[in-house]
Image (tube, helix red, strand yellow):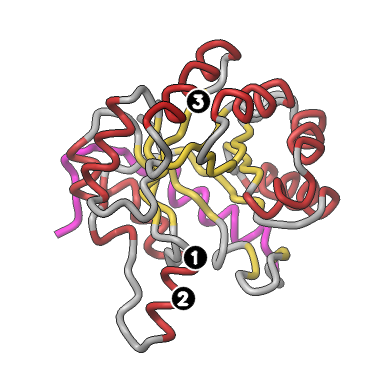
Amino acid sequence: MKPIVQISLDLTNIDEALETAALALRAGVDWLEAGTPLILAEGLHGVRALRRAFPQTPVIADLKTMDGGYLEAEMMAKAGATHVVVMARAHAETIKCVVKAGADFGCKVMGDNMICPDMVEGAKWLEDLGCDYIIHHIGYDERRGIAAAGMRMPSPLDQLREVVSAVRIPVQAVGGLTLEQAIQCPRYGAPLVVLGAPLTIDADAFKTADGDLETSLRMICEAIHSQEVSPISFPN
């Protein structure tokens, strides 16, 4: 499987999200993510706007669904989302409902293992319940809180190898990755590379990062797309 580059539009207004998305696609990004801040700020309108502006591009709705799974997935699919996100810490019935809605409305399901007591088992459980992709995720508040306490900030790379080995579906790693770490993800067998805070979004203000973002993104996309993905090809 060739690597796929996804940009997380963790912004709070439609206009900036559309502008950033257009720039990202010009640079070579493959998938657009309506990030949780955008969904909270703009709801279905943000997803509809992305679908109208980019009719051929996959759009991920980062719902972080915990309940009401069928309705949430149905609403986002009808608004134009091609992928929705459900949390592993949701009830099994909620995950099953999201998977059922995905099948009914032609939408893929991404299962997020954030804050699972056992991240590897959480990923396996999501796969067993019918998810199409795994998001191996260390949360924003968790990372910042641990760092503020003077301890080493956890990284999704810590267990990425184990998660990839435990499941048969594609995996993406999310949560505080540096630019170098994000580019390395295909070498861990994780073909879905997410670019967002702090790479392309100001993590404190939730606005587009300053600088020549398009040129930077183009270089990042080229570096990622040039790689081959193998689940048994890991860094030493």
Towards the viewer: 108 or 27: 108
Q: Relative to 158, does residue 145 appear above or below in the rendering? A: below
Q: Residue furthest top?
A: 104
**Rendered location of residue 93, percent (x, y):** 41, 26
Label 2 sits on what residue type? Arg
Q: Relative to 27, does residue 92 appear above or below in the rendering? A: above
The residue shown at (69%, 26%) is: 75
**Rendered location of residue 143, percent (x, y):** 42, 71
Q: Is 39 on the left or on the right of 107, as rendered?
A: right
Q: Residues within 10 Å of mark 2 (few under 14, many from 20)?
A: some
Label 1 sits on what residue type? Tyr
* Range of magenta residues: 211-236
Q: CA distance from mark 2 to mark 3?
A: 30 Å
Q: Residue furthest right?
A: 15
Q: Residues within 10 Å of mark 1 (few under 14, many from 20)?
A: few
Residue pointed to by mark 2 = 144
Disc 2 + disc 1, Cβ < 8 Å: yes
Q: Relative to 56, does residue 167 appear above or below in the rendering? A: below
